[in-house]
Amino acid sequence: RIYALVFNQQLASEDFDGARETLELRIASGEIQSKINSSRVSLIMALALQAKSNGKLDVYDMQISKALSLANQSVLDYAISDFVWRTYGRVLVEIGEMQEAINAYGEAYRIAPSNKENIRSFMSALFKDGSESQRLLRTLRDAIKKFPRDKQFNTAWLEVERQFGSSW
């Protein structure tokens, strides 16, 4: 687990060579393949976003295509893993496929409905898309029932209710 934390910190600081080395250590330690694949997708996406910010759109397109292919294959190979569905959703959001991203995040939420990351990812996609306000309100209401003291969920409820709720 410490390798995963180090890997994520390396991605955040754009230490991609270090992230590759840490990923190799994770593979050698026997970490489950679905997590390895998701981390590979994260690394590829980080490289893609760096290329995009540097104006190298051809490299961005190539890397995003690679990330999408790996994420899609992971979903096929590990369909019962909420983690791979969430990773697939991230790639879909990046390429602007919001309805497909909602479906992917929805599947992650269906598999593990008490996982806060799944709830947040699903709600975020629903909010960004804006076309399924009732589904968003229902998901938020369920999240608040499960986690009544979660300030993020309560704040989100107020914002969503303000934007999509019925006026008196």
Image (cartoon, rainbow, N blue to C red):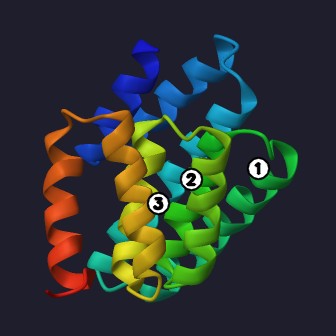
Q: Residue 112 vs residue 148: left or right?
A: right
Asked whether disc 1 touches disc 2, contact meaning CB atoms under 8 Å apart, the reply is: yes
Name the residue beneath numbered marker 2.
87
* Amino acid type of the residue tagged 1 in the rendering: Ser
**Is 158 placed above or below 8 here?**
below
Q: How many marks?
A: 3
- Which label lies toward us, 1 or 3? 3
Residue 63 seen anywhere in this rendered image of the structure: no
Q: Residue at x 53, y 57 (%)?
A: 44
Residue closest to the far right: 77
**Is 119 placed above or below 57 here?**
above
Residue closest to the far front: 168
**Is 164 placed above or below 12 here?**
below
Residue 164 seen anywhere in this rendered image of the structure: yes
Gap in angstroms between the C-alphas marked 3 and 2:
12 Å
Badge 2: residue crowd in 10 Å (few <14, some 14–19, many ≥20):
many
Q: Residue 153 vs residue 159: left or right?
A: right
Residue nearest the viewer, comparing 165 with 100:
165
Give the percent coordinates (x, y) of residue 132. Answer: 47, 82
User: Which picture quadrant has residue 125?
Assistant: bottom left
User: Which picture quadrant has residue 12?
Assistant: top left
- Which label lies toward us, 3 or 2? 3
